[in-house]
Amino acid sequence: MKTAEELLTHYFEIKSPTALYQIADSLKDFLQKGLIKEMPGTCSVFDISIGQPFPDDIINIEFETIPGGARYLLSCDTYHGAGGVLKRL
């Protein structure tokens, strides 16, 4: 099985709500498998679901890989539609 760090080696640009939902679903899976941990913030990746309003206009959620401690940021402007990224910090 690949580590979360190996799976998160790419810079992901978010250009649509569908892309955000897909990335959020992958991150939820990594969290449930114990591959990453979510850092405390204003919202959780579990708050991002199809058919539900976005938890905030600007989403910024940090994650850390287990083991390894590599940090990643999911950042997205859901109000203005400017898109976002999932990137390594």
Image (spheres, rainbow, N blue to C red):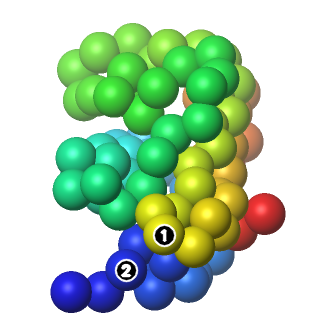
What number is the disc on residue 27?
none
Disc 1 target residue: 67
Above or below, 67 relative to 22: below
Using the numbered discs, state the Cα–Cα distance from disc 1 to disc 2 in whole angstroms: 8 Å
Position of residue 29 in the picture relative to residue 41 (left or right): left
**Residue in the image at 51% along x and 63% along y:** 65
Disc 2 target residue: 3
Position of residue 27 in the picture relative to residue 42 (left or right): left
Q: Position of residue 2 (x, y in %)?
A: 30, 86
Q: Position of residue 51 (x, y in %)?
A: 23, 20
Q: Position of residue 48 (x, y in %)?
A: 37, 28
Q: Position of residue 47 (x, y in %)?
A: 38, 21
- Marks 1 and 2 in Cβ contact (< 8 Å): yes
- Give the secondary structure at mark 2: loop
**Residue in the image at 32% along x and 48% along y:** 31
Residue 43, by quadrant, is: top right
- Give the secondary structure at mark 1: loop
Residue 57, by quadrant, is: top right
How many numbered tags mark residues here? 2
- Decide: few, some or many residues near mark 2? Use Cα within 10 Å; few <14, some 14-19, many ≥20: some
Of the residues under marks 1 and 2, which one precedes in the sequence? 2
Q: Mark 1 belongs to which amino acid?
A: Pro
